[in-house]
Amino acid sequence: KQEVTQIPAALSVPEGENLVLNCSFTDSAIYNLQWFRQDPGKGLTSLLLIQSSQREQTSGRLNASLDKSSGRSTLYIAASQPGDSATYLCAVPGNTPLVFGKGTRLSVIA
Amino acid sequence: NAGVTQTPKFQVLKTGQSMTLQCAQDMNHEYMSWYRQDPGMGLRLIHYSVGAGITDQGEVPNGYNVSRSTTEDFPLRLLSAAPSQTSVYFCASSPPTGTGGELFFGEGSRLTVL
């Protein structure tokens, strides 16, 4: 059974800092890995989708990496801004549609 | 392009009442799924469908019913609402996972059962 763990559960950083969010999964036989953002009271917005053949994917200040052999992915956020404050979730396919981690709640302090 | 549309956004029910949460997508996605999100529990899969006429249970299916008569629609039915079903419900759709499909979510439906 696929299990996804995200560390840390919460993170508070000053504005401008570069930061890394971690995601680990137990079954490395995955097609892809997806990172989402969720603002309070809102739905989930897809940030990055990394296919199993890729090692990383970039969008603006976001860079996600994937290491299937070790069962790990990282989301790197450069030059963080208060608008980046949200919960970030990673998800991978399991035997059913995506299995989610519980997320990292990020607060960027101005 | 509307994406994934859920209705209603908010609903209050009394214990024992039934209701249907509607979900529609206009991206011609084969996969559709329903999740519930509770504090400290994360997102948990209720039911999913890999195509019209095909549904299967997820992690927490009890008390819920689904059907998939068309590619576009995937309603979630609460048969006899219980306070434990108070939650935020999300519908999602994607192309088949095997093709590396990206998952898209609706805005959510907040349900309170008194």
Image (cartoon, rainbow, N blue to C red):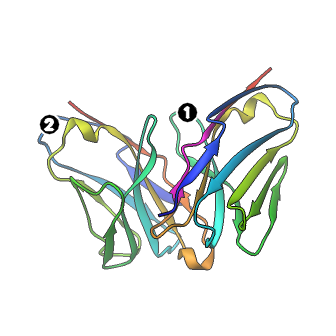
Nearest the eye: B80 or A64: A64
User: B88 above or below B72?
Assistant: above
B63 in relation to B65, above or below: above
Q: Residues within 10 Å of mark 2 (few under 14, many from 20)?
A: some
Please say whether residue A103 is one of the residues in the magenta stretch.
yes
Disc 1 on helix, strand or loop?
loop
Q: Which image quarter holds the N terminus of chain B?
A: bottom right
Callout 1, which amino acid? Answer: Pro
> How far apart are labels 2 and 1 at the CA level?
27 Å
Residue drawn at x 32%, y 70% as measured from the top left: B56
**Point 47% across, 59% down: residue:** B92
Q: Residue furthest left?
A: B16
Q: Secondary structure at mark 2?
A: loop
The image position of residue A90, as x and y in percent, is: 62, 52
Residue B57 part of the magenta-drawn span: no
Relative to B90, A60 lies left or right:
right
Please report the residue visible at 74 percent of the width from the left and 32 percent of the height from the top.
A83
Q: Classify residue A107 by image quadrant.
A: top right
Residue underneath mark 1? A40
Query: Do tag 2 and tag 1 residues touch (Cβ < 8 Å)?
Result: no
Q: Which residue is mark 2?
A: B15
Magenta residues span A99-105
Q: B5 and A47: which one is in front?
A: A47
